[in-house]
Image (spheres, coloured by chain):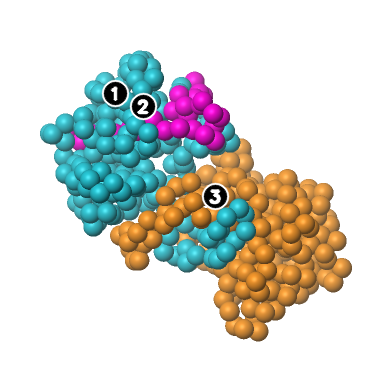
Chain colours: A orange, B cyan
Amino acid sequence: MNAGLIVAAGKSERMGPTADKAFLNLGSKPVIAYSVIAYERCPDIDTIVLVVRKDRVDAARAMAKIYGCAKVLKVVAGGASRQVSVANGLDVVGDETRIVSVHDGARPCVTPQLISETIAVARKHGSGVAAYKITDTVKHVERGVKVTRTMDRSKLWAVQTPQTFKFEILSKAYEFVKKKKLSVTDDAQAVESIDGEVRLVPAPLSNMKITCPDDLVLATILLGL
Amino acid sequence: MNAGLIVAAGKSERMGPTADKAFLNLGSKPVIAYSVIAYERCPDIDTIVLVVRKDRVDAARAMAKIYGCAKVLKVVAGGASRQVSVANGLDVVGDETRIVSVHDGARPCVTPQLISETIAVARKHGSGVAAYKITDTVKHVERGVKVTRTMDRSKLWAVQTPQTFKFEILSKAYEFVKKKKLSVTDDAQAVESIDGEVRLVPAPLSNMKITCPDDLVLATILLGL
């Protein structure tokens, strides 16, 4: 069994003080619906778990029903950080799961094909994480907008989601970071903390994340809405 | 006098062995035409210098004429690296220049407004470099696609162009790197090498660079072609 774990429980400070970006409108659907539909349509995914804000659990269930996403078996409340939200999701994914594909609900341009590619690499290597090689020059900025130095970009990749792993590896990694009280920014970093191998899967720049109002405009264009 | 210096003399290895990406078709115009038109339309730009491959000098002149870009006063041949190409351009920009705005011809989605913003910041602080704060997690990859560690993304900005400077600063910086035989990836790094202040100007992700065939598709969408 392969599970999709779609996380959309975060704060959206750049969208306004009370906004929940997962439920903002993008074309005719809420942002999160696009990811859920992509996972529903991916032939390599058997079940989907959604992690949303506590006050959105019912809305998320209704959304899955409206868009005919029958693979959505569980909708659970997230926590104060992405890390806690993913852990909450992993708790209910189910023991029969072999592969778990974690995805940010704020990346609506994900495709069933990209999900499948990360699953194929995770099956072989334990992990398959969507990422792109950074082609722009990267500057280190100590504070504000003054550059302190230029990084060696040839070694830098920006990672996105899906971040797909063998379930036993990801669940061991999340137990480890919880026990050690480590804070991680993504699932790959949790796996890095147990010295697990993290393999990158080249993904398009168009698999962007919605973080500010301008991104909604860009996503509308990219999705052809 | 404020000059635009548009550089499009590079190799385009990811586009095929002999491709010159500046002259690939994007909608009905060559890629480079979009940047030239944006500089032409920017009210803060007085003159434009184009730096192209030696075998494209005539084609670039004809292109400027076709699209009515009357500010294009000089078209010169570039060198083996971006650094040499920019230096060639700076040589002909002219002594009456106060501000020079360097731009990659492979970024067709630049707008007159963004050019003006970098000029305003450069007037005040000596430099104004288009950049965006990296919102994706960044991984360090020693070789291939295996992650070695996670970077602190809160301090990382990806820089684009326009990179705009007071002419005296940029020209001093390029003289310095030439004399010291330093190799720099962008204009900001040249200025960093003389301990000049590099100020970043927040720019949209849509000001992307064409590096591979997929990017042409993305640019077509972003430009509404």
User: Do the dots labelled 1 and 3 sit on one chain?
Assistant: no
Q: What amino acid is at disc 1?
A: Val
Image: A175 above or below B88: below
**Residue that appears at 25% across and 43% down:** B178
Residue at mark 1: chain: B
Q: A197 or A11: nearer the eye?
A: A197
* Mark number, residue B75: 1
Residue at mark 2: chain: B
Which residue has dot 3 on it? Answer: A133
**What secondary structure is marked by label 3?**
strand
Q: How many marks?
A: 3
Q: Is residue A121 left or right of residue A193?
A: right
Q: Do labels 2 and 1 touch, CB within 8 Å?
A: yes
User: Do the dots labelled 3 and 2 sit on one chain?
Assistant: no
Q: Is residue B211 one of those drawn in magenta?
A: no
Q: Residue furthest left?
A: B96
Q: Earlier in the sequence, mark 2 or mark 1?
A: 2
**What secondary structure is marked by label 2?**
strand
